[in-house]
Image: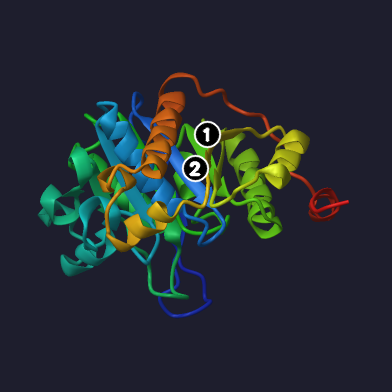
Amino acid sequence: MTTTLARPADGEGSVQVQQDPSAKIEEGALVIAVYGKGGIGKSTTSSNLSAAFSKLGKKVLQIGCDPKHDSTFTLTHKMVPTVIDILEEVDFHSEELRPEDFMFQGFNGVQCVESGGPPAGTGCGGYVTGQTVKLLKEHHLLEDTDVVIFDVLGDVVCGGFAAPLQHANYCLIVTANDFDSIFAMNRIVAAIQAKAKNYKVRLGGVVANRSADTDQIDKFNARTGLKTMAHFRDVDAIRRSRLKKCTIFEMEPTEDVIAVQNEYLSLAKKLSESVEPLEAESLKDREIFDLLGFD
Protein backbone atom coordinates (compact mmCIF):
# COMPACT_ATOMS: atom_id res chain seq x y z
CA MET A 1 0.00 0.00 0.00
CA THR A 2 2.16 2.83 -1.24
CA THR A 3 1.46 6.44 -2.06
CA THR A 4 2.78 7.64 -5.40
CA LEU A 5 4.66 10.92 -5.15
CA ALA A 6 5.74 13.24 -7.92
CA ARG A 7 8.33 15.87 -7.08
CA PRO A 8 8.01 18.89 -9.35
CA ALA A 9 10.81 21.42 -9.73
CA ASP A 10 8.97 24.17 -7.87
CA GLY A 11 11.02 24.35 -4.71
CA GLU A 12 13.22 22.15 -2.61
CA GLY A 13 11.22 19.54 -0.72
CA SER A 14 7.99 20.25 -2.60
CA VAL A 15 5.67 17.25 -2.64
CA GLN A 16 2.48 16.62 -4.58
CA VAL A 17 0.37 13.53 -4.07
CA GLN A 18 -1.96 11.10 -5.75
CA GLN A 19 -3.91 9.07 -3.20
CA ASP A 20 -3.46 5.30 -3.15
CA PRO A 21 -6.90 3.93 -4.13
CA SER A 22 -6.44 0.94 -1.79
CA ALA A 23 -6.03 3.18 1.27
CA LYS A 24 -9.72 3.44 2.02
CA ILE A 25 -11.64 3.34 5.26
CA GLU A 26 -13.57 0.08 5.62
CA GLU A 27 -17.25 -0.11 4.82
CA GLY A 28 -19.43 0.14 7.90
CA ALA A 29 -18.12 3.29 9.55
CA LEU A 30 -20.00 6.53 8.96
CA VAL A 31 -17.35 8.92 7.63
CA ILE A 32 -18.05 12.67 7.73
CA ALA A 33 -15.82 15.45 6.38
CA VAL A 34 -16.39 18.90 7.89
CA TYR A 35 -15.53 21.87 5.66
CA GLY A 36 -16.10 25.61 5.69
CA LYS A 37 -14.47 29.02 5.56
CA GLY A 38 -11.36 29.46 7.70
CA GLY A 39 -12.26 30.53 11.24
CA ILE A 40 -15.94 29.67 10.90
CA GLY A 41 -15.92 27.15 13.77
CA LYS A 42 -15.26 23.80 12.08
CA SER A 43 -13.13 22.43 14.92
CA THR A 44 -15.71 23.45 17.52
CA THR A 45 -18.44 21.88 15.41
CA SER A 46 -16.42 18.71 14.78
CA SER A 47 -15.43 18.20 18.40
CA ASN A 48 -18.90 18.80 19.80
CA LEU A 49 -20.39 16.56 17.10
CA SER A 50 -17.89 13.83 18.04
CA ALA A 51 -18.91 14.25 21.67
CA ALA A 52 -22.58 14.04 20.70
CA PHE A 53 -22.03 10.81 18.74
CA SER A 54 -20.22 9.37 21.77
CA LYS A 55 -23.20 10.33 23.93
CA LEU A 56 -25.34 8.22 21.57
CA GLY A 57 -23.10 5.25 22.29
CA LYS A 58 -21.00 5.42 19.12
CA LYS A 59 -17.27 4.64 18.93
CA VAL A 60 -15.86 7.82 17.43
CA LEU A 61 -12.55 8.81 15.83
CA GLN A 62 -11.82 12.46 15.01
CA ILE A 63 -8.99 13.28 12.62
CA GLY A 64 -7.75 16.87 12.55
CA CYS A 65 -6.39 17.83 9.10
CA ASP A 66 -4.86 21.21 9.86
CA PRO A 67 -1.16 22.05 10.42
CA LYS A 68 -2.28 24.05 13.50
CA HIS A 69 -3.29 20.67 15.01
CA ASP A 70 -5.94 22.33 17.20
CA SER A 71 -8.92 20.25 16.11
CA THR A 72 -9.10 17.95 19.12
CA PHE A 73 -7.82 19.98 22.07
CA THR A 74 -11.32 20.52 23.51
CA LEU A 75 -11.72 16.73 23.54
CA THR A 76 -8.28 15.91 24.98
CA HIS A 77 -7.75 19.15 26.96
CA LYS A 78 -4.29 19.45 25.43
CA MET A 79 -2.42 19.89 22.13
CA VAL A 80 -1.46 16.38 21.02
CA PRO A 81 1.52 15.46 18.78
CA THR A 82 0.81 15.15 15.07
CA VAL A 83 1.13 12.06 12.90
CA ILE A 84 3.57 13.76 10.54
CA ASP A 85 5.87 14.87 13.39
CA ILE A 86 5.88 11.41 14.95
CA LEU A 87 6.56 9.73 11.59
CA GLU A 88 9.49 12.09 11.04
CA GLU A 89 10.95 11.03 14.39
CA VAL A 90 11.18 7.42 13.17
CA ASP A 91 12.26 8.36 9.63
CA PHE A 92 8.80 7.34 8.35
CA HIS A 93 9.21 3.72 9.49
CA SER A 94 5.61 3.40 10.63
CA GLU A 95 6.15 -0.18 11.85
CA GLU A 96 8.11 1.29 14.77
CA LEU A 97 5.09 3.17 16.08
CA ARG A 98 2.50 2.07 18.60
CA PRO A 99 -1.13 3.35 18.52
CA GLU A 100 -0.60 5.30 21.74
CA ASP A 101 2.16 7.28 19.99
CA PHE A 102 -0.32 9.08 17.72
CA MET A 103 -3.85 8.32 18.97
CA PHE A 104 -5.18 9.90 22.15
CA GLN A 105 -8.39 9.32 24.06
CA GLY A 106 -10.58 12.33 24.64
CA PHE A 107 -13.95 13.17 26.17
CA ASN A 108 -16.26 10.18 26.68
CA GLY A 109 -13.91 7.82 24.86
CA VAL A 110 -13.59 9.76 21.58
CA GLN A 111 -10.31 8.76 19.90
CA CYS A 112 -8.32 11.72 18.59
CA VAL A 113 -5.65 11.99 15.89
CA GLU A 114 -3.99 15.14 14.54
CA SER A 115 -2.52 14.67 11.07
CA GLY A 116 -0.53 17.89 11.12
CA GLY A 117 0.91 19.15 7.87
CA PRO A 118 4.06 19.80 5.88
CA PRO A 119 6.07 22.98 6.48
CA ALA A 120 4.58 26.01 4.76
CA GLY A 121 5.21 26.07 1.03
CA THR A 122 6.86 22.64 0.89
CA GLY A 123 4.17 20.03 0.47
CA CYS A 124 0.65 18.79 -0.03
CA GLY A 125 -1.89 18.30 2.75
CA GLY A 126 -3.32 15.35 0.88
CA TYR A 127 -0.10 13.42 1.47
CA VAL A 128 -0.49 13.91 5.23
CA THR A 129 -4.12 12.77 5.16
CA GLY A 130 -3.17 9.70 3.13
CA GLN A 131 -0.34 8.80 5.52
CA THR A 132 -2.68 9.14 8.50
CA VAL A 133 -5.34 6.83 7.06
CA LYS A 134 -2.63 4.36 6.02
CA LEU A 135 -1.17 4.36 9.53
CA LEU A 136 -4.58 3.82 11.13
CA LYS A 137 -5.26 0.90 8.80
CA GLU A 138 -1.86 -0.69 9.44
CA HIS A 139 -2.66 -0.74 13.15
CA HIS A 140 -6.25 -1.97 12.58
CA LEU A 141 -7.62 1.09 14.34
CA LEU A 142 -10.52 1.66 11.96
CA GLU A 143 -12.06 -1.80 12.22
CA ASP A 144 -14.04 -1.17 15.41
CA THR A 145 -15.07 2.43 14.76
CA ASP A 146 -18.66 3.57 14.17
CA VAL A 147 -18.03 7.20 13.18
CA VAL A 148 -14.98 8.93 11.68
CA ILE A 149 -14.96 12.74 11.49
CA PHE A 150 -12.39 14.60 9.36
CA ASP A 151 -11.99 18.24 10.43
CA VAL A 152 -10.48 19.89 7.36
CA LEU A 153 -8.41 23.08 7.00
CA GLY A 154 -10.22 26.23 5.87
CA ASP A 155 -11.94 26.64 2.51
CA VAL A 156 -9.00 25.31 0.48
CA VAL A 157 -10.35 22.97 -2.18
CA CYS A 158 -7.15 21.92 -3.94
CA GLY A 159 -6.59 18.23 -4.56
CA GLY A 160 -4.69 17.89 -1.29
CA PHE A 161 -7.24 19.29 1.11
CA ALA A 162 -10.07 17.64 -0.82
CA ALA A 163 -8.41 14.29 0.01
CA PRO A 164 -10.75 13.50 2.96
CA LEU A 165 -13.64 13.57 0.49
CA GLN A 166 -12.20 10.38 -1.00
CA HIS A 167 -12.99 8.59 2.27
CA ALA A 168 -16.20 10.32 3.36
CA ASN A 169 -19.83 9.29 3.06
CA TYR A 170 -21.03 12.83 3.67
CA CYS A 171 -19.68 16.35 3.76
CA LEU A 172 -20.99 18.90 6.23
CA ILE A 173 -20.36 22.55 5.40
CA VAL A 174 -20.15 25.00 8.30
CA THR A 175 -21.16 28.55 7.40
CA ALA A 176 -22.30 31.83 8.89
CA ASN A 177 -25.07 34.02 7.50
CA ASP A 178 -22.69 36.25 5.52
CA PHE A 179 -21.36 36.64 1.98
CA ASP A 180 -17.78 35.43 2.55
CA SER A 181 -18.84 32.24 4.34
CA ILE A 182 -21.43 31.41 1.70
CA PHE A 183 -18.98 32.17 -1.10
CA ALA A 184 -16.57 29.65 0.44
CA MET A 185 -19.43 27.17 0.83
CA ASN A 186 -20.17 27.45 -2.88
CA ARG A 187 -16.57 26.51 -3.75
CA ILE A 188 -16.78 23.49 -1.46
CA VAL A 189 -20.02 22.41 -3.16
CA ALA A 190 -18.17 22.54 -6.49
CA ALA A 191 -15.36 20.39 -5.05
CA ILE A 192 -17.83 17.79 -3.82
CA GLN A 193 -19.56 17.76 -7.20
CA ALA A 194 -16.19 16.91 -8.76
CA LYS A 195 -15.31 14.20 -6.21
CA ALA A 196 -18.78 12.60 -6.33
CA LYS A 197 -18.13 11.55 -9.94
CA ASN A 198 -15.54 9.01 -8.77
CA TYR A 199 -16.16 8.56 -5.02
CA LYS A 200 -19.07 7.76 -2.70
CA VAL A 201 -19.04 11.17 -0.98
CA ARG A 202 -22.26 13.17 -1.06
CA LEU A 203 -23.43 16.44 0.45
CA GLY A 204 -25.02 15.88 3.83
CA GLY A 205 -26.05 19.45 4.49
CA VAL A 206 -25.24 22.80 6.05
CA VAL A 207 -24.49 23.76 9.65
CA ALA A 208 -25.38 27.39 10.30
CA ASN A 209 -22.95 28.68 12.94
CA ARG A 210 -22.54 31.90 14.96
CA SER A 211 -25.62 33.36 13.30
CA ALA A 212 -28.79 34.79 14.80
CA ASP A 213 -30.54 34.61 11.44
CA THR A 214 -30.24 32.32 8.40
CA ASP A 215 -31.97 34.39 5.70
CA GLN A 216 -28.90 34.57 3.40
CA ILE A 217 -28.12 30.87 3.95
CA ASP A 218 -31.75 30.07 3.17
CA LYS A 219 -31.54 31.99 -0.11
CA PHE A 220 -28.45 30.09 -1.15
CA ASN A 221 -29.90 26.74 -0.09
CA ALA A 222 -33.10 27.32 -2.04
CA ARG A 223 -31.13 28.21 -5.17
CA THR A 224 -28.59 25.37 -5.01
CA GLY A 225 -30.48 22.48 -3.43
CA LEU A 226 -28.73 22.53 -0.05
CA LYS A 227 -30.41 22.02 3.32
CA THR A 228 -29.61 23.31 6.81
CA MET A 229 -29.26 20.41 9.26
CA ALA A 230 -28.41 22.40 12.41
CA HIS A 231 -28.38 26.02 13.55
CA PHE A 232 -26.05 27.25 16.29
CA ARG A 233 -26.58 30.82 17.35
CA ASP A 234 -23.81 33.03 18.73
CA VAL A 235 -23.98 31.62 22.26
CA ASP A 236 -21.17 32.83 24.52
CA ALA A 237 -20.92 29.45 26.25
CA ILE A 238 -19.59 27.98 22.98
CA ARG A 239 -16.80 30.57 22.88
CA ARG A 240 -16.03 30.02 26.55
CA SER A 241 -15.85 26.25 26.09
CA ARG A 242 -12.95 26.74 23.67
CA LEU A 243 -11.19 28.96 26.22
CA LYS A 244 -11.80 26.33 28.91
CA LYS A 245 -10.44 23.69 26.50
CA CYS A 246 -13.50 21.48 26.79
CA THR A 247 -16.58 20.45 24.84
CA ILE A 248 -19.98 22.06 25.29
CA PHE A 249 -21.05 18.86 27.08
CA GLU A 250 -18.64 19.67 29.91
CA MET A 251 -19.94 23.18 30.53
CA GLU A 252 -22.28 24.15 33.37
CA PRO A 253 -25.78 23.12 32.19
CA THR A 254 -27.43 26.52 31.81
CA GLU A 255 -30.46 26.94 29.56
CA ASP A 256 -28.29 28.10 26.63
CA VAL A 257 -25.81 25.26 27.07
CA ILE A 258 -28.54 22.61 27.21
CA ALA A 259 -30.09 24.03 24.02
CA VAL A 260 -26.73 23.77 22.21
CA GLN A 261 -26.14 20.25 23.54
CA ASN A 262 -29.57 19.16 22.29
CA GLU A 263 -28.91 20.65 18.86
CA TYR A 264 -25.66 18.69 18.57
CA LEU A 265 -27.38 15.49 19.71
CA SER A 266 -30.14 16.10 17.15
CA LEU A 267 -27.54 16.61 14.39
CA ALA A 268 -25.75 13.38 15.36
CA LYS A 269 -29.05 11.45 15.27
CA LYS A 270 -29.92 12.85 11.84
CA LEU A 271 -26.53 11.85 10.46
CA SER A 272 -26.86 8.38 11.99
CA GLU A 273 -30.42 7.65 10.98
CA SER A 274 -32.02 9.91 8.43
CA VAL A 275 -29.56 11.98 6.38
CA GLU A 276 -30.60 12.33 2.74
CA PRO A 277 -27.79 12.87 0.19
CA LEU A 278 -28.22 16.22 -1.54
CA GLU A 279 -27.71 16.78 -5.26
CA ALA A 280 -26.76 20.46 -5.06
CA GLU A 281 -25.41 22.60 -7.89
CA SER A 282 -22.81 25.29 -7.27
CA LEU A 283 -23.29 28.81 -8.64
CA LYS A 284 -21.07 31.07 -10.70
CA ASP A 285 -19.39 33.83 -8.70
CA ARG A 286 -21.54 36.53 -10.30
CA GLU A 287 -24.70 34.56 -9.47
CA ILE A 288 -23.81 34.53 -5.76
CA PHE A 289 -23.06 38.25 -5.85
CA ASP A 290 -26.46 38.96 -7.41
CA LEU A 291 -28.32 36.52 -5.15
CA LEU A 292 -27.22 37.61 -1.69
CA GLY A 293 -27.86 40.86 0.10
CA PHE A 294 -30.83 43.09 0.78
CA ASP A 295 -33.24 44.62 -1.72
Q: Are marks 2 and 1 in contact (CB under 8 Å)?
A: yes
Give neighbour class at mark 1: few <14, some 14-19, many 20+ (Cα, 10 Å).
many
Q: Nearer the viewer, residue 209 or 276?
A: 209
Dot 2 or dot 1, earlier in sequence: 2
Picture residue at 49% right of the left edge, 42% below the top: 165
Q: What SS does tag 1 mark?
A: loop
Which residue lies at the image location 67% right of the left edge and 51% below the top edge? 182
Q: Amino acid at mark 1?
A: Val
Mark 2 belongs to which amino acid? Leu
Above/below status of 13 relative to 192: below
Task: Look at the image and tell me in which quarter the N terminus lies.
Answer: top left
Q: What is the tally of numbered marks visible in this picture?
A: 2
- Name the spot of residue 74 as percent of width and height, x first: 28, 54
Measure how far apart labels 2 and 1 are at the Cα level: 6 Å
In the displayed structure image, the side of residue 170 where residue 130 appears, left or right: left
Front-most of 255 and 41? 255
Name the residue that disc number 2 marks: 165
Label 2, secondary structure: give it: helix
Vertically, is 109 above or below 129? above
| Residue 201: mark in rendering | 1
Can residue 39 be seen at all in this image of the molecule? Answer: yes
Q: Is residue 253 above or below residue 101?
A: above
